[in-house]
Image (cartoon, rainbow, N blue to C red):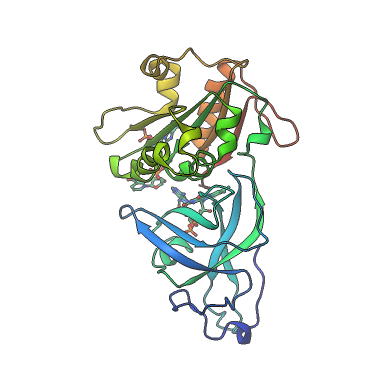
Amino acid sequence: MSESIPVTEIQTQTPTQTSPKVPALPDAQTVTSVKHWNDRLFSFRVTRPQSLRFRSGEFVMIGLMNDPDPKTGKQKPLLRAYSIASPSWDEELEFYSIKVQDGPLTSRLQHIEVGDEIILRPKPVGTLVLDALLPGKRLWMFATGTGIAPFASLMRDPETYEQYDEVILMHTCREVSELEYGRQLVESLPNDPLIGELVGDKLRYYPTTTQEQSAQMGRITDNLSSGKVFADLDLPPMDPEHDRGMVCGNLAFNKDIMAVLEGFGLEEGANSDPKHYVVEKAFVD
Ligand SMILES: Cc1cc2nc3c(=O)[nH]c(=O)nc-3n(C[C@H](O)[C@H](O)[C@H](O)COP(=O)(O)OP(=O)(O)OC[C@H]3O[C@@H](n4cnc5c(N)ncnc54)[C@H](O)[C@@H]3O)c2cc1C
Ligand SMILES: NC(=O)c1ccc[n+]([C@@H]2O[C@H](COP(=O)([O-])OP(=O)(O)OC[C@H]3O[C@@H](n4cnc5c(N)ncnc54)[C@H](OP(=O)(O)O)[C@@H]3O)[C@@H](O)[C@H]2O)c1
């Protein structure tokens, strides 16, 4: 994934440098806003390469320049996969990020400021796209932690509401403050001047916590298996004729929810073979 760039090309570039108007790094984009949600999570927006086309739900590689190699003096980009959290029509790109204190990338990325530059490889890919699902009536989005990022994109895309009668977002985190990014976004959508009318009352939101007391508690898998979420939202149990699912969480969660969805009779699809649900990792353990 990484490639060498002669040190002369990047002489004065550091992650915290105030940005020049014209990006000098290869694939550089300029940070336009940063918001810290708590000591583990932040979101930020960057300029969008004019040529970048993507489908809501896809991810790209982003990062910063690594420190120079002590022997060669060369610097390499340090890149990680990130879901684009903004919708495909947005003129900027938004990302929602974890802060891993000793993480190679996010220990530094968490300190970016407006005007700084990041590297963004404009090659979007991913399975969490509407095209990978057969037509259906209800779209369920299942996210743990930062797994909400691709759904922050999809829930702002008009196509989502054109294709489905109902859209249900289940987001589960350990603590209440970790839900805040998603909660504010969901609450803003019905009043959004661009897509508010389309969203209307189609978007249902089911946030839960597992380690801190809140209005609704419990793992997504448990709330599906027990039928609690269907009772709470007054919906029938999932079935392959009407329901479609998109999953983004940690590996164990993805594995467990796949078993639950298969139990309802849903089958996993892909871009090349659309079916009833699709899955993507929110991070690699
Ligand atoms: C397809 C895909 C899409 C991704 N999209 C996002 C995204 O939108 N936002 C985002 O924050 N991360 C996302 N990630 C994870 C991201 O690629 C990095 O792992 C993350 O930025 C941490 O980078 P790092 O170099 O600091 O630490 P790494 O060395 O990459 O990770 C160190 C450890 O931190 C933990 N960790 C890493 N990422 C997360 C996370 N997101 N949530 C909880 N624990 C984590 C894991 O235990 C991991 O082993 C995605 C990963 C994949 C595979
Ligand atoms: N968030 C924190 O406060 C915190 C603090 C220190 C370290 N960490 C570490 O950081 C990493 C990521 O933490 P994270 O909280 O962002 O993400 P996470 O571990 O993926 O947990 C996010 C949510 O997913 C739930 N979940 C986990 N496994 C599941 C499964 N198999 N089935 C259904 N639900 C499941 C968790 O419930 P449960 O709570 O029931 O597991 C939690 O509500 C982990 O390695 C963790 O040890 C996190």
Tell me the residue at 41%/22% (across/down).
Answer: 222
Q: Is residue 201 visible?
A: yes
Residue 58, percent from left and from top: 61, 46
Using the image as rendered, state which of residue 6 and residue 233 is in the foreground.
233
Residue name at image x 30 percent, y 27 percent: 216
Direction right: furthest residue: 272
* Depth order, front residue of 281/155: 155
x then y, percent, for residue 233? 39, 19
Q: Which quadrant does the N terminus fall into?
A: bottom right
Ligand 2's quadrant: top left
Q: Position of residue 121 (x, y in %)?
A: 63, 62
Q: From this view, report whether residue 165 is shown above or below residue 21.
A: above
Is 118 left or right of 130, judged from the image as shown?
A: left
Q: Is residue 142 visible?
A: no
Dividing the picture into quadrants, the one containing residue 176 is top left
Front-most of residues 18 and 106: 18
Which residue in the rendered view is the most extreme toward the left? 213
| 270 or 6: nearer the viewer | 270
216 over 15 or under it: above or below: above
Displayed quadrant of residue 164: top right
Residue that appears at 25% across and 32% down: 214
